[in-house]
Image (tube, rainbow, N blue to C red):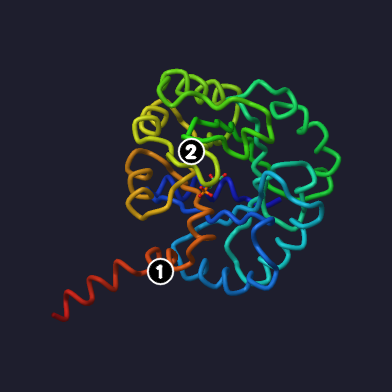
Amino acid sequence: MNHIYKDILAYISQGKKLLVVLIDPDKMTFDKVSSFIEKVNESIATHIFVGGSTVDEYMTSTLVEEIKRHTKIPVVLFPGDVTQITGKADAILFLSLISGRNPEYLIGKHITSISKLKETNLDIISTGYILIESGTETAVERVTDTEPLSRTNIQYIVDTAKAGELLGMKLIYLEAGSGAKLPVSKEIISKVNKVLNIPLIVGGGIKTKEQLEKAYNSGADLVVIGTAFEEDESFFDELKKNNEQRKTDVIDKS
Ligand code: 1GP
């Protein structure tokens, strides 16, 4: 069994923030994997998530295999469907969409997935997945046929997250949706963070270093970025390892 969740807790207890690069198998072509992953390796990314709302069967398995040929960074499945489960990854977010009221995404698909999961060594991380309104309809909304929570009813979001924790979930994921116009606000992140005793993931619509830092400073432990890297790989240059150190070196020499 892999120990991805234990490692996440260990990072956080040292006061570290984690950055996740999300790869959607639908948007990544096989020939681009090696150069893309090279950039991930040079960046401050700590984890790679693989998943999407609509992915062809078996795509995920071959893609994960190829990603793992190029990196030692842990690969975590972020599945939109049971067909995206593959034992080639290190862990899986076992997502329950607790913001919605569609039984399939609360518990149904989880039952269907058990026979597949039994054959793997994946670290299975129970995650309360909370979709928050973000300006336009997102793929998660369409595929799951659920309504996101209103971004102005913050107390309801906070209570939903706490209910997830009390049900025994190990992570809470505040999701604005891929390519969201409006990322999850700092008020929502900080209020949810205040009541939780488990790690908090935030993702959707984060496209700049400032937005990333805002999410961290508001209380996100892990931030997930997908679209910004897909659209412009030079964003990785702003998030290179030792960037801060290099800046200090330049100042020292001048
Ligand atoms: C989507 O939270 C992730 O599930 C990442 O969103 O693609 O907008 O970065 P972006």
**Which amino acid, mark 2?**
Pro
Residue at point 39%, 49% (across, down): 14
Q: Is residue 233 above or below residue 54?
A: below
Judged from this view, the residue extending furthest toward the left is: 254
Residue at numbered disc 2: 199
Q: Residues within 10 Å of mark 1 (few under 14, many from 20)?
A: few
Q: Indicate left or right for 214 with 6 as reference.
A: left
148 or 9, which is in the foreground? Answer: 148
Q: Which quadrant is the C terminus positioned in?
A: bottom left
Query: Mark 1 falls on what kind of element?
Result: helix
**Left/right of residue 253 with respect to residue 121 in the rendered view:** left
| Residue located at (84% from left, 48% from top) | 119
Q: Using the numbered discs, state the Cα–Cα distance from disc 1 to disc 2 in whole angstroms.
A: 27 Å
Q: Where 204 falls versus 40 (above or below)? A: above
Task: Check disc 1 and report the residue beneath it.
Answer: 237
Vertical order, 38 against 107 (above or below): below
Residue at coordinates 40% horizontally, 34% vertically from top-left?
189
Q: Which residue appears farthest toward the front when viewing the image? A: 136
Figure disc tally: 2
Q: Percent from the top left, x then y, of residue 24?
A: 64, 54
Residue 40 percent location from the top left of the image: 52, 66
In the rendered image, residue 196, in percent from the top left (x then y), is placed at 45, 29
Sequence-first disc among 1 and 2: 2
